[in-house]
Structure formats: structure tokens, C-alpha cells
Image: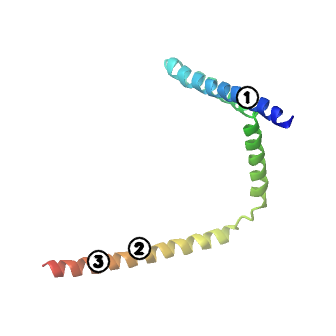
Amino acid sequence: MESKAESGTSRFDSVKWLVVFALVAVGVVGNQYFSAESILYRVLGLVALAVVATLVALQTDRGRRFAALLKEARVEIRKVVWPTRPELIQTTVIVVVFVLVVALLLWGMDSLISFLVSGFIG
């Protein structure tokens, strides 16, 4: 019984995804066809098609799972402890100084190797 319900949902999900792809294709072709029209009208049309395509996509099983993933990601982002401004500045200074030191070391090694090779070659 459960497998029949899944196969029915899967079949309708395929139709819904075909509708989503058709809406995207209509947006692409319509944007090209109406290229002489004002960009404002074309953008509004594309936004409307994108909203409809998103709503149709969210009705599928994969779309619902993606929406749940976004919700969970937002919850996790709220749990992050963001650095204070002084911590951010200190960390940035450390990274910049480290990059400069490594760059100077690489420049020195390159100059040394270049000097040795030019002396060896003549």
C-alpha cells in the first residue's frame, strides 16, 4: 500500500517538475522574444514566472525536503557565535601579516634560486 502511494506521488512529482521546466523555458524564450520591450516589463514577467515555478517546485517531495533543509540551515545559522569587531580585526591583521611573511619568504627563495641559476648558467 505504501509503495503505491509513493509511486503515485513520484509520477505527479515528475509532471510538476515538467511544469517547472516549462515555465523556465517560457521565461527564457519570452525574454528573448520580447527583447524590444522595456526591461522593467521583462523583469517583472520573469519574477512572476519564477514565483510560480518556485511554488510548483515546492509542491513536490524534493521541494518540500529542500524547504525543510533551508529552515534547518536558518536555525543552525542562528546558533553561530559571531566574532566581535575587535576579534574580527585582530584575526584579519594576523592573517594579513602571515600572508606578507610567507610572500616575503617565497620572494627571497625565488630570488636566491634565480641568482644561483643565473650564476650557474653564466
The residue that appears at 65% across and 26% down in the rendered structure is 18
- N-term mark: 3 or 1: 1
The amino acid type found where label 3 is placed reads: Ser
Query: What residue does disc 2 label?
Result: 103
- Mark 1 secondary-structure assignment: helix
In what quadrant of the picture does the C terminus appear?
Answer: bottom left
The amino acid type found where label 1 is placed reads: Arg
- Residue 103 lies left or right of residue 82; in this view the side is left
- Which of the two discs, 1 and 2, sits closer to the camera? 1
* Among the 4 quarters of the image, the one containing residue 45: top right
**Furthest residue toward left:** 122
- Residue 110 lies left or right of residue 12; in this view the side is left
Q: Residue 79's x, y, as percent?
A: 78, 61
- Which of the two discs, 3 and 1, sits closer to the camera? 1
Q: Tell me the distance, in whole angstroms, between the alpha carbons under discs 2 and 3.
A: 12 Å
Q: Is residue 21 above or below residue 108?
A: above
The one of 67 and 82 positioned closer to us in this rendering: 67
The amino acid type found where label 2 is placed reads: Ala
- N-term mark: 2 or 3: 2
Query: What residue does disc 3 label?
Result: 111
Query: What residue does disc 1 label?
Result: 11
- Mark 3 secondary-structure assignment: helix
User: Quick one: label 1, few (<14), some, or many (20+) residues within 10 Å?
Assistant: few
